[in-house]
Image (cartoon, rainbow, N blue to C red):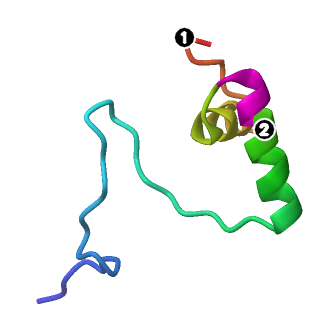
Amino acid sequence: MSQKKRGPRGGKTTLTPGGLRRKVFYLKEEENQALRRKAYEDETTESELVRQALRRFLNLPPEENE
């Protein structure tokens, strides 16, 4: 009997009540500082900026609340 391969967490994912999945990214210090600065200037979160940029990069429509 073969089992499906699962990740290090046994197939479990971290999912927020709002339906967001947790991902980990590594940034260079210059990228990190620029992201922090932009989030501060725009009075938003770093996560929100990354989601917006990713949606543009992937040619996905903006979220309704943007």
Element type at marker 1? loop
Q: Is residue 42 magenta?
A: yes
| Label 1 sits on residue | 65
The reply to whether residue 26 is visible in this rendering is yes
| Badge 1 amino acid | Asn
Spot the residue most to the bottom. Answer: 1
Element type at marker 2? helix
In the image, which disc is placed on residue 23?
Answer: none
**Mark 1: few/some/many CA within 10 Å (<14, 14-19, 20+):** few
Q: CA distance from mark 2 to mark 1?
A: 18 Å
Position of 34 with respect to 51 (left or right) is right
Q: Quick one: 34 or 6, which is closer to the camera?
A: 34
Q: Is residue 1 above or below residue 15?
A: below
Residue 54, percent across and down?
70, 39
Q: Which residues are magenta?
A: 39-43
Looking at the image, which residue is at 68% across and 34% down? 49
Residue 27, percent across and down?
75, 64
Q: Is residue 19 above or below residue 5?
A: above
| Label 2 sits on residue | 57
